[in-house]
């Protein structure tokens, strides 16, 4: 059975990986970029690309006319580093609305959100049924976009912290000496720091492709997408200290001013695993050992 083409709004770090995996399976794919410069980078990676702006529904409608009605549409554009509420509103909320207007008969809708919408600080396990009540305006905009997507029968993918070749905040911060262990003394105390939830870029892309193409997957649902091993900061940094012969990071009080807020929870992806997906890298250390490009690429950035 022929699978519908995939239109990817946002061919960045995860979007490119998704496109390449789909192309590798013989699927028709195209992405959009806002500028010619970005489009050239994407084309050089071997991905067909169109130039359009998520904030401009006319540009999206023009492209949509070239595509079959049953196209599967995924929104994985990023708000940009340092983007505030207005950027989030434009890229996520208005961007998703414009995509739905441009592709009213899409076979599947998928919006990539973030596990940062879970604001829990008690170390509890969170599932898709857990309260998601972010205390930041940016998080509330993500939630509104999620709700509108679900109401239209689309799927929401809440991605944990994304890492992969050329990108690992944990490893980079440890090697630069910027890493800290967030120790809270008042109840609920965090003597070993907060829980960290992550997903390798290739696993995130594989999950998106699975949700876009598997016939058994239900629309109108939220799917947490995270590896199988949440880890405490002290556990992570103790192992890195052993591997790199460096001291443990300092213990500091939690920083409530973090961009997405300070949280302490273990994200569970049982719903997605029950559908048939499983990560290639069940833990971050599996990736450090199994992805030959990961550590060297991060080290190269520090030279």
Image (cartoon, grey):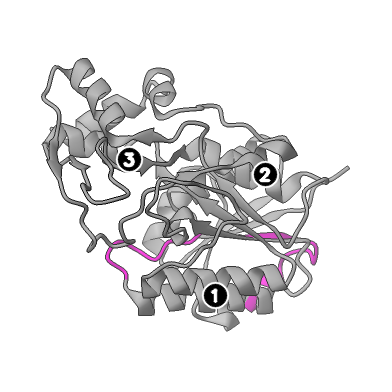
Please tell me which of labels 3 and 2 falls first in the chain: 3
Give the residue displayed 70% in from the left and 50% down from the top. Answer: 212
Q: How much space separates mark 1 and mark 3, taking CA atoms? A: 28 Å
Label 2 residue SS:
helix
Q: What stretch is highlighted in magenta?
A: 61-83
Number of other residues with Cα within 10 Å of mark 3, as a class: few under 14, some 14 to 19, many 20 or more: some
Residue contact at pointers 1 and 3, CB within 8 angstroms: no
Please tell me which of labels 1 and 3 falls first in the chain: 1
- Position of 80 relative to 210 (above/below): below
Query: Can residue 63 be seen?
Result: no
Q: Position of residue 14 (x, y in %)?
A: 48, 47
Q: Residue at the front extreme?
A: 187
- Disc number lying in front (2 or 1): 2
Q: Is residue 35 left or right of residue 157?
A: left
**Residue that mark 1 sits on:** 144
Label 3 residue SS:
loop
Q: Quadrant of the C terminus?
A: top left
Q: In which quarter of the image is the N terminus?
A: top right
**Residue that mark 3 sits on:** 167
Q: How much space separates mark 2 and mark 1, taking CA atoms? A: 22 Å
Give the residue displayed 19% in from the left and 34% down from the top. Answer: 174
Give the residue displayed 28% in from the left and 42% down from the top. Answer: 190
Q: Position of residue 276 (x, y in %)?
A: 72, 35
Q: Residue at the right extreme?
A: 1
In this view of the protein, which residue sits in the foreground, 29 or 104? 104
Please check the rendered image and state whether residue 282 is part of the magenta-colored stretch, yes or no.
Answer: no
**Residue that mark 2 sits on:** 271
Which of the 4 image quadrants contains residue 270? top right
């Amino acid at each position: 059975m022929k699978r519908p083409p995939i239109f990817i709004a946002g061919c960045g770090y995860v979007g490119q990986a998704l496109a390449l995996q789909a192309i590798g399976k013989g699927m028709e794919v195209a992405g959009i970029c806002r500028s010619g410069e970005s489009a050239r980078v994407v084309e050089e990676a071997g991905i067909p690309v169109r130039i359009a702006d998520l904030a401009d529904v006319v540009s999206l409608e023009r492209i949509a006319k070239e595509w079959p009605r049953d196209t599967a549409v995924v929104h994985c554009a990023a708000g940009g580093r340092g983007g505030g509420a207005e950027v989030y509103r434009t890229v996520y909320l208005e961007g998703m609305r414009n995509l739905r207007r441009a592709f009213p008969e899409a076979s599947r809708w998928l919006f990539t959100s973030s596990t940062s919408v879970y604001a829990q600080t008690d170390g509890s396990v969170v599932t898709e049924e857990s309260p998601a009540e972010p205390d930041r305006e940016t998080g509330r905009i993500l939630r509104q976009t999620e709700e509108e997507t679900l109401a239209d029968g689309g799927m929401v993918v809440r991605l944990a912290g994304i890492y992969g070749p050329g990108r690992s905040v944990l490893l980079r911060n440890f090697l630069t000496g910027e890493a800290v262990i967030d120790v809270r003394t008042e109840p609920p105390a965090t003597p070993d720091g907060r829980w960290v939830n992550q997903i390798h870029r290739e696993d995130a892309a594989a999950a998106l492709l699975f949700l876009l193409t598997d016939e058994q997957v239900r629309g109108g649902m939220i799917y947490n997408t995270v590896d199988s091993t949440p880890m405490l900061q002290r556990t992570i940094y103790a192992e890195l200290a052993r591997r790199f012969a460096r001291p443990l990071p300092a213990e500091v009080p939690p920083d409530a001013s973090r961009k997405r807020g300070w949280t302490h929870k273990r994200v569970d992806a049982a719903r997605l695993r029950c559908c048939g997906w499983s990560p290639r890298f069940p833990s971050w250390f599996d990736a450090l050992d199994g992805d030959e490009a990961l550590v060297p690429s991060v080290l190269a950035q520090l030279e």
